[in-house]
Image (cartoon, rainbow, N blue to C red):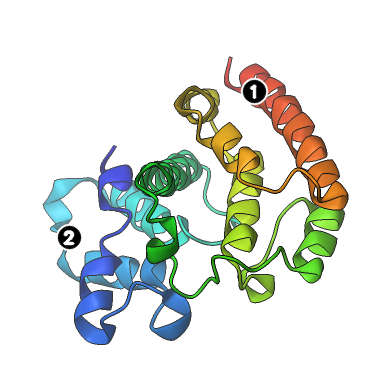
């Protein structure tokens, strides 16, 4: 859908104005995309309800949680969020294959361990915050938790088929018992989530 194609519209002016794609040092690219499209998307492209649904999908595609939105906008928002996650997972998988994933995430130290604060957060909420992330392992652990926020069964199936989830899991040291226990439970929860969205989408 158009929401998936346009979800990163804000990236263009973000990089033009700040020379970075890191929201924390510039602007929220979802909010920026919403502003750009609200100003520039022709009104005759779609009726007002569909146009607003597209704008909301762009605005909220990168947020940790979705607010209450009009029912007509929610499917577009969920689809754009899945699309965004698949984009990033694909990029990370490619960079891991090339051995350049550390270059992709220069703010995250390649050789540093997982943050204890992040482990606490994931164990408690099964999601993670970037405020607790300073290493590459932190980012990869947070990314694995994204699988629990995938909205549609085909999206999760694409992730599993790509092998990126197991590839990320295998990148963690096998001798770190707490990390391995969290990963094991996380993958159990991913399987449970898959069954739930399979039923809800059928």
Residue 170 visible (yes or no): yes
Label 2: element kind: loop
Image vertical order of residue 56 relative to residue 85, above or below: below
At mark 1, the secondary structure is helix
Front residue (pair 107, 121): 107
- Say if 56 sits above or below 94 in the image: below
> In the image, 100: left or right of 118?
left
Relative depth, front residue between 191 and 32: 191
The circle drawn on residue 41 is: 2
Q: Rate crowding at label 1 as few (under 14), some (14 to 19) or many (20 or more) other CA atoms within 10 Å.
A: few
| Dot label at residue 18 | none
Query: What residue is shown at x 86% (from left), y 56% (from top)?
Result: 124
In x, y percent, where is residue 2? 26, 43
Q: Are there few (<14), some (14-19), or many (20+) residues within 10 Å of tag 2?
A: few
Question: What is the x, y in percent for residue 183?
Answer: 76, 42
x then y, percent, for residue 177: 87, 47
Residue 89 drawn at (x, y percent): 45, 44
Residue sitting at x 38%, y 83%: 26
Name the residue at 39% across, 41% down: 97
Count the labels in the image. 2
Q: CA distance from mark 2 to mark 1?
A: 33 Å
Q: Comparing marks 2 and 1, which lies closer to the viewer? A: 1
* Image-based side of 180 in relation to 197, left or right: right
Quadrant where the N terminus is found in the figure: top left
29 vs 124: above or below:
below
Q: Which residue is mark 1?
A: 200
For this rendering, which residue is in front, 23 or 176? 176
The one of 170 and 133 positioned closer to us in this rendering: 170
């Amino acid at each position: 859908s158009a929401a998936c194609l346009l979800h990163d519209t804000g990236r263009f002016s973000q990089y033009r104005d700040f020379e970075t794609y890191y929201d924390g040092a510039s602007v929220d690219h979802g909010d920026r995309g919403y502003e750009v499209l609200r100003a520039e998307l022709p009104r005759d492209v779609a009726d007002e309800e569909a146009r607003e649904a597209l704008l909301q999908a762009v605005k909220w595609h990168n947020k940790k949680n979705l607010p209450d939105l009009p029912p007509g906008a929610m499917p577009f928002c969920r689809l754009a969020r899945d699309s965004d996650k698949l984009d990033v997972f694909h990029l990370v998988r490619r960079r891991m294959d090339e051995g350049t994933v550390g270059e992709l995430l220069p703010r995250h130290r390649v050789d540093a361990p997982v943050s204890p604060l992040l482990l606490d957060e994931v164990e408690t909420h099964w999601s993670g915050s970037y405020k607790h992330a300073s290493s590459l392992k932190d980012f990869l652990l947070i990314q694995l938790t994204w699988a629990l926020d995938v909205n549609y069964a085909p999206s999760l199936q694409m992730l599993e088929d790509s092998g990126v989830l197991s590839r990320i899991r295998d990148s963690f040291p096998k001798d770190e018992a707490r990390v391995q226990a969290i990963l094991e439970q996380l993958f159990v929860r991913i399987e449970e989530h898959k069954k739930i969205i399979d039923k809800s989408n059928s």
